[in-house]
Image: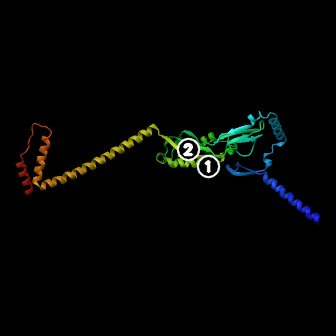
Amino acid sequence: MHSGIKQHHNWKLDDERRQRLTTSSVRTFPITTYNHRTGNYTHEKNHTASREDYHVGLCGYILVILSYVLIFITFPFSLTVCLKVVQEYERAVMFRLGRILGGAKGPGLFIIVPCVDAYTKVDLRTVTFDVPPQEILTKDSVTVAVDAVVYFRVFDPVISITNVEDAPKSTQLLAATSLRNVLGTKSLQEILSDRESIAQTMQAALDEGTECWGVRVERVEVKDVRLPVQLQRAMAAEAEAAREARAKVIAAEGEQKAARALKDAADVIMQSPTALQLRYLQTLTTIASEKNSTIVFPIPIELMQAAIGSFRTS
């Protein structure tokens, strides 16, 4: 009975040891898979993989051992080949016999094994590129040429190397496609007036499309909207006609106000003959100030007063 209990205890220890070894050999890394049926990408940030996923086979282990022996024989000269440095704004993605070796390395110093290890540097700084002018047919059937500026950076070096061949080039092509798709649903007036809203829509679309590439789009700016020459002339003629119409309305309103003021002044002068005489003398003073040698009085003041009096009596 004691032997049975001891054997059961040993089995339990073996299970715990096996579980502990399995847990210690598990690594996590980001991975993106493509579903051919649905046509969608699935991005998993913490994919778990055991040591079997990094198994390089018997030949691979032999090559690794021979490489370590070669490093030991040629030491310290082999340090010039084994030691690599990446800057603060860079990360190194390492491959051992074609398989990813852990996560991204850096910044600083790291070691590679010659003949079996290879690495690729990834720049994490923000990159800017211009989207070439795109010929776009708007919702109201107007053809315009629009260009933009895109700011992006790599946030996951590993999947930016493993999931896409050229992340910056792919992002640029996707930006051109997104620009055509977004502006194709807008009218010309919306494109000219709502550039900020269009930029935000483009940024959201690009950020969603480039997430599986390890790229984050930080900002999108619409630079220039070029209209056809005929449309520019038509819009200029329309704007000029609108300005002329506004000028005529303003001039008519000014004449109307001036006529009302003149009528009010005439009513005041008609009520007071003295005011008319003062206005007459003021006019003579104004004429005399212009250095005229001759002043013509078309009608005497007395006759004017008599005429005004008879007019008021009638």
Q: According to the image, label 1 marks what residue? A: 208
- The answer to whether mark 2 and mark 1 are in CB contact below 8 A is no
Q: Position of residue 198 (x, y in %)?
A: 52, 48
Of residues 85 and 42, the one nearer the viewer is 85
The answer to whether residue 292 is left or right of residue 164 is: left
* In this view, 195 is above or below 79: below
Counting residues from the start of the chain, the first of labels 2 and 1 encountered is 2
Whether residue 55 can be seen here: yes
Q: Nearer the viewer, residue 123 or 204?
A: 123
Work out which quarter of the rendered image holds the C terminus and state it: bottom left
Where, by quadrant of the figure, is residue 309 drawn? bottom left
Above or below 314: residue 158: above
Residue 46: % across, % down: 71, 52
Q: Amino acid at mark 1?
A: Glu
Indicate which label's residue lies in the foreground, 2 or 1: 1
Quarter of the figure with the N terminus: bottom right
Q: Position of residue 41 (x, y in %)?
A: 67, 49
Numbered tag placed on residue 179 in the rendering: 2
**Label drawn at residue 75:** none
Residue in the image at 13% along x and 54% along y = 270
Q: How is the image coloured?
A: rainbow
Task: Point out the residue furthest to the front here.
Answer: 76
Q: Residue at x 57, y 46 (%)?
A: 218
Residue 136 percent across, percent down from the top left: 53, 42
Residue 70 drawn above or below residue 154: above
Disc 2 to disc 1, C-alpha distance: 14 Å
Q: Residue at x 59, y 46 (%)?
A: 217
Q: Residues within 10 Å of mark 1 (few under 14, many from 20)?
A: few
Please indicate, yes or no, whether residue 314 appears anywhere in the rendered image: no
